[in-house]
Amino acid sequence: MELQIDDSALVRDYISGDERSLEILINRHNQRITSFIYSKVLDRDVTEDIFQDTFIKVIKTLKRGNYSEEGKFLPWVMRIAHNLIIDHFRKNKRMPKFEGGEDFNIFSVIGDDKPNIEKQLIKDQIDSDLSLLIDELPDDQREVLIMRIYKDMSFKEISECTGVSINTALGRMRYALINLRKIIQKNKIVLTN
Amino acid sequence: MDQLYPAKQNCKLVSSSEETVRFLLDYSKSLSIVSSRGMEFENNLN
């Protein structure tokens, strides 16, 4: 008949340096603790992680000599596991997990707002072409267009800055756009992104 | 304890893998904690 050493004696032996005692403790309670964790998280990999973290805490506490619940080893380990399970769910709540399947790719839902290199090059080219076209406009129209589009000024501000009425500024802007379109059509320029 | 955590029949009984247990035992062997002047130092000798 095999003599079963109780947990408190094993804990005492382990603290004294007997590593074999830890192996007995882990193997003795492995199924109960793992099943408890699994019943909460329902994921084998997460269960293994939490089980591992639980015993890392157990090992550290015992080696530090901070364990004082003699005779209540399993409830103590269960409580550590329970706290780690709560931590796991808290962490997942902060950072929801997204898992891709065969017919689902996360990158089809999320993306980078920045244009890729090709689009950036095209945009730079268009900006450059557009500035050449704007240079072709009469001075007064060019001035209003630059203030409105590039400096984002209101027509009231433009009128104050240029010393003309708002209606005149509006008119100059209108003619600037008409003339730009004419230049684009005349030279058969294509500005697309 | 048995009353608090009964092995329910409808619960799936699972055990952690041998690798996990082996890792924990190796971790335990490699870890030593020393105290000096009120401070604790963890040494992991691999």
Image (tube, helix red, strand yellow):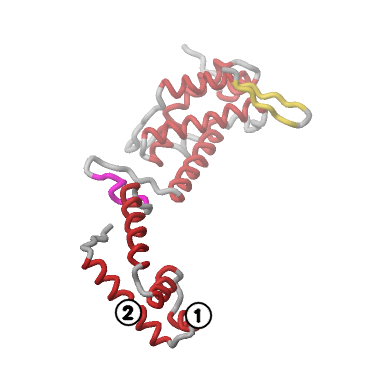
Chain at tag 2 = A
Is residue A130 or residue A29 the one in the foreground? A130
Numbered mark located on residue A161 in the image: 1
Question: Which one is earlier in the sequence, the residue at label 1 or at label 2?
Answer: 1
Nearest the viewer among A82 and A116 is A116
- Name the outermost residue toward the top: A1
Tell me: residue A38, above or below residue A30: below
Crowdedness of circle 2 by 10 Å Cα count: few (<14), some, many (20+)? some
Q: Quadrant of residue B41?
A: top right
- Chain under callout 1: A
Q: Is residue A107 magenta?
A: yes
Residue farthest right in this picture: B37
Disc 1 marks which amino acid?
Cys
Circle 2: residue type: Arg
Residue lying at 36% horizontally and 58% vertically, measured from the top left? A128
Please name the residue that numbered disc 2 is placed on. A174
Using the image, tell me which numbered label, if any, was put on residue A138.
Answer: none
Asked if A74 appears above or below A111 in the picture, the reply is above
At x 60%, y 25%, the residue is A8
Would you say the residues marked 1 and 2 are in contact, meaning their CB atoms lie under 8 Å apart? no
Part of the protein shown in magenta: A104-112
Q: Is residue A68 magenta?
A: no
Type of secondary structure dominating the magenta stretch: loop
Residue A157 as seen in the image, left or right of residue A38: right
Same chain? Circles 1 and 2:
yes
Instruction: Identify the residue at image location x=70%, y=29%.
Output: B40
Mark 2 lies on a secondary structure that is helix
Give the number of marks: 2
